Image (cartoon, rainbow, N blue to C red):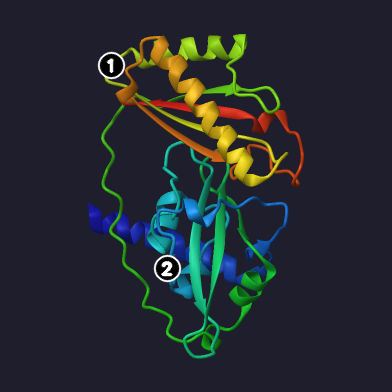
């Protein structure tokens, strides 16, 4: 069964690769409006030296399993379910001895969890991706990733969102209603809650990170007051690094001032 799965994914990946190679418009580009997470928040801060043949097979329509077979797991605190962005830190030799460039690469998934876009942080990285493979020495061999283990059947994840006033961390009355619903959902079975707090881009990054931490604390305290054991809550704060609505710096965007809660088993 595993062998048939690997062969099937390989065939699908190869089919996408043919279309990708035939249409340069599918190449990842550099777009200043795309927001990338801070490397200091990565789980693999030094990144990896990717196989560039694998990288160039990334194309719209691919699933997360197919991306996993080509590039491995993402390098930040990104999961699988309900996640629409995977971010990687990729290193490339420049051709000048041991000199290399570290690049950030982002893949975005649509509502059906298939690739609908990919971006580089910085034009230099996009240009390096377009360079002939022969210009970059010591490409590592294509990694062989084992297919993901079959996931056990479990109740579907449930998500909730609490929004905040500008520069605020107090939970509003509508936010309290959302948290009561989340606490009730978490009370059925051995559920856990993962919450992540965000800000808009108004203010500097350090201030926004601290503000998102205050929002996480406020939501966590409210959940505990509603009877959710603190040990079942995993709180994270990411500041302005992962906006729901990408904006330029300094924009007051209400949809980005939020805490998302995912309830799972």
Tell me the quarter of the picture where residue 126 sits: bottom right
Number of residues whose C-alpha sits closer than 10 Å to that of mark 1, classed few (under 14), some (14–19) or many (20 or more): few
Of tags 1 and 2, the one toward the viewer is: 2
Return the x and y of residue 113 as percentages of the image width and height: 51, 43
Q: Is residue 77 above or below residue 233?
A: below
Residue at the disc numbered 1: 189
Tell me the number on the disc at residue 48.
2
Residue drawn at point x = 46 percent, y = 69 percent: 54
Percent x, y of residue 212: 56, 33
Q: Secondary structure at mark 2?
A: loop
Image coordinates of residue 247 in percent, x first then y, are 73, 43
Question: How many circles with numbers are drawn on the protein?
Answer: 2
Real-space CA distance between mark 1 and mark 2, rounded to the nearest whole angstrom: 39 Å
- Give left or right: position of 28 versus 48: right
The reply, left or right, for residue 240 in relation to residue 2 is: right
Element under label 1?
loop
Quarter where residue 47 is shown? bottom left
Q: Quadrant of residue 234?
A: top left
- Left or right of 47: which side holds 111? right
Residue 102 rendering spot, x and y as whole percentages:
53, 70
């Amino acid at each position: 069964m595993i062998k048939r799965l690997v062969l099937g994914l390989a065939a699908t990946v190869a089919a996408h690769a043919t279309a990708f190679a035939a249409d340069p418009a599918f190449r990842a580009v550099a777009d200043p409006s795309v927001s990338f997470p801070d490397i200091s928040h990565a789980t693999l801060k030094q990144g990896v030296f990717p196989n560039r043949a694998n990288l160039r097979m990334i194309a719209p329509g691919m699933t997360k399993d197919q991306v996993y077979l080509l590039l491995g797991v993402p390098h930040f605190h990104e999961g699988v379910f309900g996640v629409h962005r995977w971010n990687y830190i990729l290193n490339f030799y420049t051709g000048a001895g041991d000199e290399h460039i570290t690049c950030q690469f982002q893949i975005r998934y649509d509502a059906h969890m298939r690739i609908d876009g990919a971006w580089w942080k910085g034009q230099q990285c996009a240009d390096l991706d377009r360079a002939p493979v022969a210009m970059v020495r010591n490409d590592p061999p294509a990694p062989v990733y084992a297919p993901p283990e079959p996931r056990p059947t479990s109740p579907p994840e449930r998500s909730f969102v609490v929004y905040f006033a500008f520069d605020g961390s107090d939970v509003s009355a509508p936010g309290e209603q959302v948290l009561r619903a989340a606490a009730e959902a978490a009370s059925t079975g051995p559920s856990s809650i993962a919450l992540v707090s965000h800000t808009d881009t108004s203010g500097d990054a350090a201030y926004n990170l601290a503000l998102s931490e205050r929002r996480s604390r406020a939501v966590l305290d409210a959940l505990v007051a509603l009877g959710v054991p603190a040990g079942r809550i995993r709180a994270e704060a990411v500041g302005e690094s992962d906006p729901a609505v990408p904006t330029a710096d300094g924009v007051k965007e209400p949809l980005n001032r939020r805490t998302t809660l995912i309830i799972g088993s």
